[in-house]
Amino acid sequence: WPSDPQWGNFAEAVNASPYLTYFRNSDVVTGSIIVLQFLIMIPAAYAFAKYKFPGKTLLFGMILLAFMIPGQVTFIPVYLMMADWGLVKTLLPQIIPFISNAFGIFLLRQYFMQIPEEIIEAARLDNATEFKIIRKIMIPMSKPALATIALFSFVSHWNDYFWPLVMTDSAAVR
C-alpha cells in the first residue's frame, strides 16, 4: 500500500478526459436503443408468431439472415450512409443501425408462439384491440424474455467501443 496516497491524481484523471460526457452519451445511446428496439421487436414478433400473411417465411428468413451477418461486414456501408446524411457529428449513427434487433425478434417470436391462442381469442371476445392484447397479455407473459433481451442489448451497447469510434469524428459524441 502507498504510504502517502495522492487522491488529487483521481481528480486530475477525471478532468483530463470528458468522462461525464462519455457517460451521458452512453446512457442516451443505450437507453434509446433499448426503447426503440422494444417498439420494433414486440409488434414484429407478435405478427410473426400469431398472424398468417403472404411472405411470412421469407421475411422471417431475412430477419434470421440479418441475425447471422456480423457487424464488421456492415460498418463501412453504414458509415458512408450516415456521412452522406450528415449525421456523423450526432449520436444518431450509434442509435439508428440498432433499432431493430434480429435476435430479439427471433426470441420473442418463439416465446409468443408458446402462449396459447385461447387466451388471445378470449381477449378478442372481450373487444380487446391488438395493441391492448400486446400490452395486457403478451408483454406481461413474456417479461423473462424481454428482460433477457434488454440485458443483452444493454451490455452489448454499453460496452461497445469500436462502433462509436468509427461512427463519430469528435469526442463530444463518443
Image (cartoon, rainbow, N blue to C red):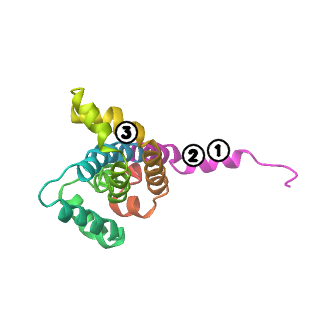
Which is more toward the observer, 94 or 22?
Answer: 94
Q: Alpha-carbon distance for marks 2 and 3?
A: 43 Å
Image x and y of residue 14, in percent = 59, 47
- The amino acid type found where label 1 is placed reads Ala
Give the magenta part as a residue range.
Answer: 1-29
Q: Rate crowding at label 2 as few (under 14), some (14 to 19) or many (20 or more) other CA atoms within 10 Å.
A: few
Q: Residue at x 42, y 47 (%)?
A: 30
Kindly check if marks 1 and 2 are in contact, taking CB atoms under 8 A apart as contact.
yes
For the view shown, which residue lies furthest in the bottom direction?
Answer: 73
Which quadrant of the figure has residue 162?
A: bottom left
Secondary structure found at label 3: helix
User: Looking at the image, is mark 3 or mark 1 earlier in the sequence?
Assistant: 1
Q: Nearer the viewer, residue 44 or 11?
A: 44
Q: Nearer the viewer, mark 2 or mark 3?
A: 3
Return the x and y of residue 23 as percentages of the image width and height: 49, 45
Locate residue 2 relative to residue 121 in the image: left or right: right
Q: Which residue is mark 3?
A: 139
- Crowding at dot 3, Cα within 10 Å, few <14 / some 14-19 / many 20+, comes out as some
Give the residue at mark 2.
15
Residue 127: x, y in percent? 21, 27
Q: Is residue 11 magenta?
A: yes
Q: Image height check: is 33 above or below 64?
A: above
The extreme front residue here reads 118
Please name the amino acid that badge 2 sits on. Answer: Asn
Residue 54 relative to residue 135: left or right: left
Q: Which mark is residue 11?
A: 1
- Please state which of residues 95 and 79 is positioned toward the viewer in this rendering: 95
Q: Is residue 165 above or below residue 39?
A: below
Say left or right for 13 vs 165.
right
The quadrant in which the N terminus is found is: bottom right
Distance in Å between CA atoms under marks 1 and 2: 6 Å
Check residue 17 for magenta coloring: yes
